[in-house]
Image (tube, rainbow, N blue to C red):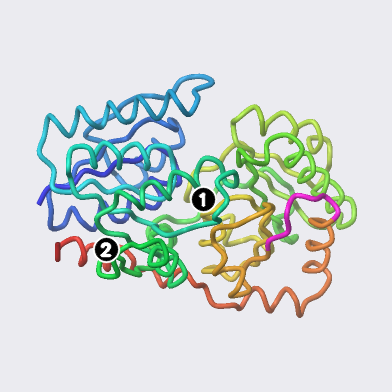
Amino acid sequence: MKILFVFGTRPEAIKMAPLILKLRQDLDVKVCVTGQHLQMLDNILELFKIVPDFNLNLMKKNQNLEYLTGKILSGVTEILKQEKFDWVLVQGDTTSTMAGAMAAFYQKIKIGHVEAGLRTFNLEDPFPEELNRQITSKMATLHFAPTEKNYQNLLNEGCPKEKIHITGNTIIDSLKWVLKNVPEPEESLEFADTHEPIILVTGHRRENFGDGLIQICSALKKIAKHFPHIQIVYPVHLNPNVQNPVKRILSKIKNVHLLKPLGYPEFIHLMNRSHLIMTDSGGVQEEAPSLGKPVLVMRKTTERSEAVEAGTVKLVGTNSDNIFEEAQNLLSDHSKFKAMSIAHNPYGEGNACEKISRFILGN
C-alpha cells in the first residue's frame, strides 16, 4: 500500500508528523508539502526528521486563495499522475487540504481526512476554513473524527456510518512526543522573572485582522496594567496584518513581551509553564487542556465546541471589555481557575495515530 501525505502549513505538519512516523513502520509513505507556509513548516519537518519527497514551493509574497488553490490542485495532480498511490491523506481545513483532496478525487484515489467533522456551520467564520473542510468531507473515503460531536456532524450530513471513525486528535500525539523526546530549552526567555505567572497569547487568524486584533491588543494592554505582576508573553505571527497593530499597541508595556515566532518544542514547553492561555488558534484549544491550562478563545465562533462543553475552554469573542472581564475572573477567582484547569480533555489520550493506522491498514 502506497500513501501520499499532502499538507502545507505548520499546524498541519504538527498534526501529520506523528502519523507519518507511525505509518512508515508498515507502508510505503511519501510526503508532498505545498509551501503554503515555508520557514515555520521546515522547522516542524526538521524536528520530526521528515524529508519531503515533493515540494511545490508555492509560497510567494501576498499570495491569495485563488492562486494557492489552482497551483496546489495542478501540482498535486502532476504527482498523482507520475506515481501510483492507493491513498492521499489530508488534514483539517486548509487550502492545501481542500485542493489536495480534490486532486485525489479527480484521479479516483482514496482520500483519508484526518481531523474530520469540525463545523461552525458559518462559511464566513472561519474563512475559508469552514468551506474547505465541508468540501473535503464530500470527497473523503474515510473520515477520522477527533470526537463524538465531529462524528455526529458527519453523520447528519449523510456520510456513511461505516466510513467515520472516532480517533481523538493527532495533536495530542505530537504534544506527548515533544514532551517525551525534546528537553526544555536551556536558554532564558526574553523576560525577566519567569517565577511570575505567565499568560501565553497567540493571535493571528484572518477573520480577526483589523478591528478584532485591535480589540484583542487593547484588552491585553488593560490586563497588563491591571495585573502588573503578570507576565504576558506573545509570540507574534510574521504576517504584517498581525505585526503592525500588535507592536503599535503593546510594544512599550513593561510586562508584555513580544517574541519572534517560537519553534514548536519551545512553544509546547512555554505552554506547559504558563498559568493561562489566550488565543484565537484552533490547535491550542486542543493542546492546552492536556496540560491543565485554562484557555480563553478570542473568536466569535469555535468549531471545537467539545472543549467549551467540557469546561476547558471559554469562548470570549473579540470585544476588548469582555476579554478583560473574563481574564480578570480567572486571575482573581481561584475556584473558577481550578474548575477549568482540571476539566477532562475531550480530544483523546494521545493514541489517535495508532487508531488511524489500524483503520487505514484495514482498508
Q: Which mark is residue 356?
A: 2
Residue 63 showing in the rendered view: yes
In-front residue for pair 200/125 = 125
Q: Position of residue 131 (x, y in %)?
A: 47, 45
Q: Amino acid at mark 2?
A: Ile
Magenta run includes residue 305: no
Residue 180 showing in the rendered view: no
Does label 2 or label 1 sit earlier along the sequence? 1
Q: Residue at x 82, y 68 (%)?
A: 329
Q: Which residue bears the numbered disc 1?
A: 185
Magenta run includes residue 318: yes
Indicate left or right for 153 with 219 as reference.
Answer: left
Occupied quadrant, residue 217: top right
In-front residue for pair 283/99 = 99
Q: Amino acid at mark 1?
A: Pro
Q: Which residues are magenta?
A: 315-321
In-front residue for pair 206/224 = 206
Q: Position of residue 249 (x, y in %)?
A: 81, 36
Q: Residues within 10 Å of mark 2 (few under 14, many from 20)?
A: many
